[in-house]
Amino acid sequence: MRRFDLVIVSFVTAILVLGLMLISWHTVRSAEEVLLPALDSKAQSVAGSIAGLGSEAVEYGIPVDRFVQAEDVLRAVLDENRDFAFATIFNADGDIIAQAARGNAGGFDGATEDDYIMVSAPIEAGGVLAGDAMIGTPRAVGERLVRDLWIDVAVLLLVSVLVTLELTAFAFTLPSALILRGLTQRLEALRRGDVRPHPELTGRGPLAEEVTVVDEEIVRMREEHRTLRERAEEAGDREALETLERLSARHRLSERRELPPVNLAAVRAPIFLFFFAEEMTRPFLPSYIATYARPMLGLSVELVIALPIIIFMAIVALTQPTLNGWTERLGRARSLRTGALLACFGYFGTGFAESMVELIAARTLTATGFAIVFVSAQGFIVDRTAPAHRARGIGLFVSAIMAAMLCGPPIGGIVADRLGDATAFTVSAVMALVAYVCALVALPSDGPRGGEVRRSVRMSDVRRVLAQPLMVSLLVGCALPSKMLLIGLCFYILPLSLAGQFEPAVIGRVLMLYGLAMLVIVPAVSRWSDQASLRMSFVVLGGIASALSVAHFFIWPQPWGAALMVLQIGIAQGISTTPQSALVGEIGKQILPDLSEGGIYGVFRLVERMGTALGPLFVGLVWSFASLELAMVATALLVACGALTFALSWWVAPDGLKHTARGAQG
Amino acid sequence: MITRRTLLVTGAAGAASLTAPYIVRAADKPFTIFEITYRGETDVERGFRDYLDQRGIPVNIIHRSADLDPSRVPAILEEVRAAKPDLVYTWGTPVTLATFGRFDDADDGTHITDIPGVFTMVSTPEKAGVVETRATSGRNITGTSHVVPPEPQLRAMQAYQAFDTLGVLYTPTEPNSVAIVAELRELGPVMGFKLVEATFPLDGDGKPHADTAPELVAGLAEQGAQWLYYLPDTFLSQNIDKVAPAATALRLPGFSAVELLQKDALISLVSRYYSLGQLNGYKAEQILVGKVPPQDIPIETLQRFALIINMPLAKKLELYPPLGMLSYANVLTD
């Protein structure tokens, strides 16, 4: 990052973090003051209502010792209030008449003031005390509430910083910021004594005038140097020529500035915001769908829940080749805006759907918008980068998605938790709308483009690539199941199975670990795997590690088991993702030299995306015919077998192939 | 492409469909409703009026009572024809039959056929011949029934005190009772109980008598009955003072499905008259404001019932209600 940007960004971030920390601290403190007494008064009011019922019975002439099925009443109270550990009814002598206790809590006997807050209310009739109703709340509940609040606040803080960084970077692409930065660049270059010309920068206002003055001065200086040099050459003044040469070398007077790639940062903010909108829905989407799901069209409930997810993924996977040409013709910026708007309506519709059919329709609309944005954003970058800078451009795109994967789930969870699922979808709709506005403001509109349209994946390419056993084992054995695992387990079955016990905020934090692991691991591994030429080992290791991750779910209590599982999947896929993609290109080049790299990658991406749709389908099928546990294990086995098959194919493949593949970039 | 406008329009239409199904005609002249009851005004009529009032439907109600004598109805019908009301309302099976006739035997001259009608408090509209099926009357009337179906009644008994044997004493000449007992026989295996039955003996003229009622109750108790089910049986209701004390003496709790026996049974599950009136009011609204033909409106009973606990009897039997039941039941005290 340039120094100017760095200073501004650090400054903004520092102010923001400081301010947020102050607000957070204040918020949690005042929440503590409100929450803990509220917990106490809730217990008090519930004890009061049990005592009220008891008093009513006593007034009717039922003695406290003859209360019938009082345990049922107490049990219902515990079921309604997850915070309470036990509820007890005593007679006037203090004997326990009825009691209900949760799980491992023993009830009133053995409960101490240190561990429990115990409140009671009198059962009385006509002013005579007949007994008591008591509620016991573990002191840990209050501590847990405050701890959860701190975690929520910390997540918000982290996400705010990330969002601010995105938006600051975005602000740099606005015309006034561009001029300011351009001027800074010029002055900094002059300070270093660098008088190479700068790329032209047009604008209005005093700053733009300054820029023009500097540029004109640089041109004049260079012109003067050239004239002096010509004169010295004519005069044959060797000494003067040497001095001029020294000056030229020191101040780079004869050099041209190598033009940096077109500024792509402008597309990053809309991408980030847009993917943020989708990622927000991850923690609660499956359980939200589940509330609508009834067996239909001969499908089991499990499959009906998976259906909108499968349809979404299938649309994104299958429409990409077609959309590439379509968005190119319509213009990337315009299609990106169209997609964002479609998705905006889609989220809105999802939040307010009244039936499964409406929900599927709304998700289909979202998927269409999502696919359009995905393809046009990628196309926008590819169109504007030379092959040499393309990897960097795509890196920009991928890192925006990863940042969204990190921020979206926890924020979505918190919103769904506090304001409900429908509001959370509305927030997603608003985010998509903001992405639309960002694109409208920042992306240069590009009309329909003439010339060649990059060709999409052809069936013949697919057939040719998949006729190669080594490629099959890499694509179908590794790439496909790893996406099946990610979508089928992390985005479908896991949020659904956790939803019974935990709030969306917790599920969001669990899912965030995937983005976090990817964000940390991918850059580290991409350097390392290149140097070590250990791509095959990384791919196999990643496969086995992500398969084994499922074990965490069964070993540890939730949500820790799920969290470790998601974290390990993130690490494992972070390890295998870059080497896998590199191997596809290298092996492809060796085995199918006449097929373009684009063709091979097209097939690779297609197979990979098929996995995203097949994952929930496979998991849903196994789940409806057997069990949730078996569905998880079966998916893991699929991933492990695929990885081992690839290892085996590699092992039997001709040596020459491996060496070239290994050394291609090493 | 979907525009914001179409979305807003769809949203608005959706919102409208959630609110009032019908829009009341504003500042129009009130509807005239002619009420004919069996024994003066009851809570049913109060619920009916309150419902229409709350919905903002202006009505002008003319009320006439048959004063326990259905033969007075034809004279009232003359008044109806003169008044030309928008709707005719009837209370109870005899008044309803006298007003609208049987479904297969209505006569334009004798009965009201050209004015829409709503009836209420008809316990078995099909068996009484008011309508052929509850789904549709097939003619210009609809209405409500007050009888609680047996299944919720049995569940209420189970909730108070679980049982596996249920006793029932009824009159073999009352078709309504025979039909309910047949239904109970079917429900037994499904809900897991045995039904033990006794019937009032008939004399030479085929008339039932209740002299042996205490022995019949004792017989049911000996067969293991844990509850005695009081059906909406007219003869049983008239002779409950011979039946209920015998059951109490044997510590056998009674259950009733009609409000009339709530002081004799330990618990009763009944349709509240007031709520029934409100349901009838809804049907009147559909006809008057919604312009729905009455034959398109099904005949219904309430879905929620009132549970009444007879606390003096509970104390006498030392059979107290579950604590939780007190939060939703109505309790009769001394």
Image (spheres, rainbow, N blue to C red):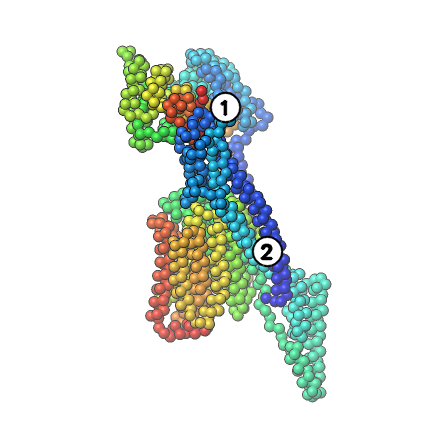
Residue at the limit of the structure toward the front, as seen here: A93
Q: Nearer the viewer, mark 1 or mark 2?
A: 1
Q: Position of residue A549 (x, y in %)?
A: 40, 58
The label number, if any, that marks residue B264 in the structure image: none
In the foreground, B173 or A628: A628
At x 62%, y 75%, the residue is: A256
Q: Position of residue A659 (x, y in %)?
A: 40, 74
Residue B244, quarter of the rendered image: top left
Q: Amino acid at mark 1?
A: Gly
Marks 1/2: CA–CA distance: 59 Å
Residue A481, quarter of the rendered image: bottom left
Query: Circle 2 sits on which residue?
Result: A438
Q: Is residue B126 left or right of residue A255?
A: left
Q: Position of residue A459 (x, y in %)?
A: 40, 62
Instruction: Let me know if residue B304 appears in the view.
Output: no
Residue neighbourhood size for the residue with mark 2, other residues' Cα within 10 Å, grouped as few (<14), some (14–19), many (≥20): many
Q: Amino acid at mark 2?
A: Cys
Q: Position of residue B129 (x, y in %)?
A: 37, 21
Instruction: Let me know if residue B102 appears in the view.
Output: yes
Query: Circle 1 sits on which residue?
Result: B47
Residue B75, above or below A529: above
At x 50%, y 21%, the residue is: B46
Residue A656, quarter of the rendered image: bottom left
Of all chains, the one bearing label 2 is A
Q: Is residue A65 left or right of residue A449?
A: left
Of all chains, the one bearing label 1 is B
Q: Are marks 1 and 2 on the same chain?
A: no
